[in-house]
Amino acid sequence: MKKVIVISTSLRRGSNSDMLADKFVEGAKSTGNEVEKISLVGKEIQFCKGCFGCQKLGKCVIKDDVNDIMAKVLEADVVCWATPIYYYEMSGQMKTLIDRMNAMYSQDYKFRDVYLLTTAAEEEEETPKRAEIGLTGWIDCYPKSRLAGTLFCGGVNEAREIMGNPKLQEAFELGEKV
């Protein structure tokens, strides 16, 4: 059994990327894993100030929701990020959270496998590539970890357009592989 954290970064409840995250959760649970989904809806996540206080303290000096999220990520065996693609990049709130997790850099971490689930209005295969590159920049700071899988669902604009899309089943199956 693995401890899995799924971070849904869309700020719209029931968004397409959030539904992919739910299917991943369902798949991971179906194989006996302990799974927690963290939605960024309603979370306070301020921008990094670049003060490097976190490197001395092992946590961020800013008092918001990031330290609690970070503590869960440090203890997880698997981390799955779900994001809508905006202008061919991960959501701003995902990037802000990644930047704020700088305090993890000097700490021991358990995660080995990282997954990325993305949705976008565009359908071209290269649409999520910048988001993947951004996430692998974070992963590269944790040499015991790797990008274990990605899933892109293009051609979805409105919330719930993903219903009935085969990518929902693929997200479930990706979760089963954890």
Image (spheres, rainbow, N blue to C red):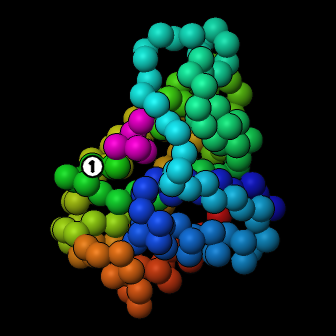
In the rendering, at what x and y percent does residue 76 appear?
71, 47
164 above or below 101? below
Residue visible at 47% across and 66% down in the picture: 13
Q: Residue 173: name its quadrant.
A: bottom right
Q: Residue furthest bottom?
A: 164
The magenta segment is 92-96
Residue at position x 21%, y 59% in the image? 126
Reply yes or no: does residue 7 show up in magenta.
no
Circle 1 residue: 89
Instruction: Give me the residue at 60% from left, 25% from top.
Output: 63
The amino acid sitting under disc 1 is Glu
Whether residue 93 appears in magenta in the rendering, the answer is yes
- Using the image, determine if residue 117 lies above or below residue 98: below
Residue 174, percent from left and from top: 55, 71
Query: Is the N terminus in the top left, top right, bottom left or bottom right quadrant?
Result: bottom right
Does residue 76 appear anywhere in the picture?
A: yes
Residue 136 found in image quarter: top left
Q: Describe residue 10's horizontal placement relative to residue 35 as left or right.
A: left
Residue nearer the viewer, 36 or 49: 49
Residue in the picture at 65% in, 64% down: 178
- Left or right placement of residue 144 versus residue 110 in this view: left
**Circle 1 residues within 10 Å: few <14, some 14–19, many ≥20:** many
